[in-house]
Image: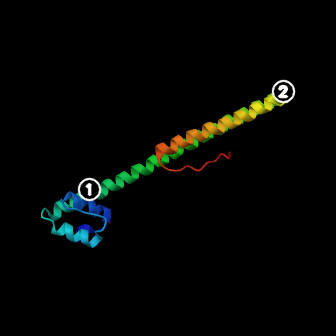
Amino acid sequence: MSIFAGASKCNLKILSEELGETVDNSHKLKDLKKMILASKVYNEESTKECLNTIINERKEREENERRNEEIAERRLQEEIQIEKRRRREEKNTRNGSERKNTRNGSERMNLRNGRERMKWNLSCKKCILEQKVGFQIPSPIKM
C-alpha cells in the first residue's frame, strides 16, 4: 500500500479511471485504494509509475495556472500604472490650460466628461481582462 503515499483522492480517482474502473464522487479514499488493488489490470510497478505521472502532471498544471495568474496580474498592474501616468500628465496639462480658459464652465464640463470617459474605458478593459483570466480584480478606481 506504500504506492499510495502522498496521493490525494482526486489523483486516485484518475488512476482508477485509467485502470478501467468506474468512479463517482461517493467513493472514499480507502474504497478507491481497494478498487485499484482489486483491479484486473493492477500491476504494482506500472500503477506506481502511472500514479507518479498523474501527480507530476497535476503539479505542473497547477504551477502553470499560478504563473498565468501572476502574469495577468502584472499586466493589469502595468495597465493601471500607464493609466495613472497618463491621467497625471493630462491633469498637469489641464491645470495649465484651465487657468487660461476660465471664461465659462464649458471647459470644466468637458474635462469632467473626459475623466468619466477614461474611468469607463478603464473599467471596460478591466472587465474584459477579468473575463479572459477568470478571476475578480480589485478596482483601484473609485467611480
Residue at the image point whose x is 64% and y is 47% from the top: 140
Q: Is residue 108 left or right of residue 69?
A: right
Identify the element where label 1 is drawn.
helix
Give x and y (percent) for residue 62: 39, 54
- For the C terminus, the image quarter is top right
- State the CA–CA distance, disc 2 to disc 1: 70 Å
Question: Is mark 2 in CB contact (under 8 Å) with mark 1?
Answer: no
Q: Tell me which label, 2 or 1, sits earlier in the chain.
A: 1
Give x and y (percent) for residue 51: 25, 60
Which mark, by number, is residue 53? 1
Q: Write down the quadrant of residue 120 in the picture.
A: top right
Give x and y (percent) for residue 90: 71, 32
Q: Residue furthest left?
A: 40
Identify the element where label 2 is drawn.
loop
Q: Residues within 10 Å of mark 2 (few under 14, many from 20)?
A: few
Decide: is 111 above or below 19: above
Q: Write down the quadrant of residue 96 in the picture.
A: top right
Amino acid on which the number 1 mark rests in the picture: Thr
Q: Which residue is mark 2?
A: 101
Front one among 142 and 74: 142
Q: Is residue 12 left or right of residue 62?
A: left
Front one among 118 and 58: 118
Residue at the image point whose x is 79% and y is 32% from the top: 108
- For the N terminus, the image quarter is bottom left
Q: Is residue 131 left or right of residue 115?
A: left
Q: Residues within 10 Å of mark 1 (few under 14, many from 20)?
A: some
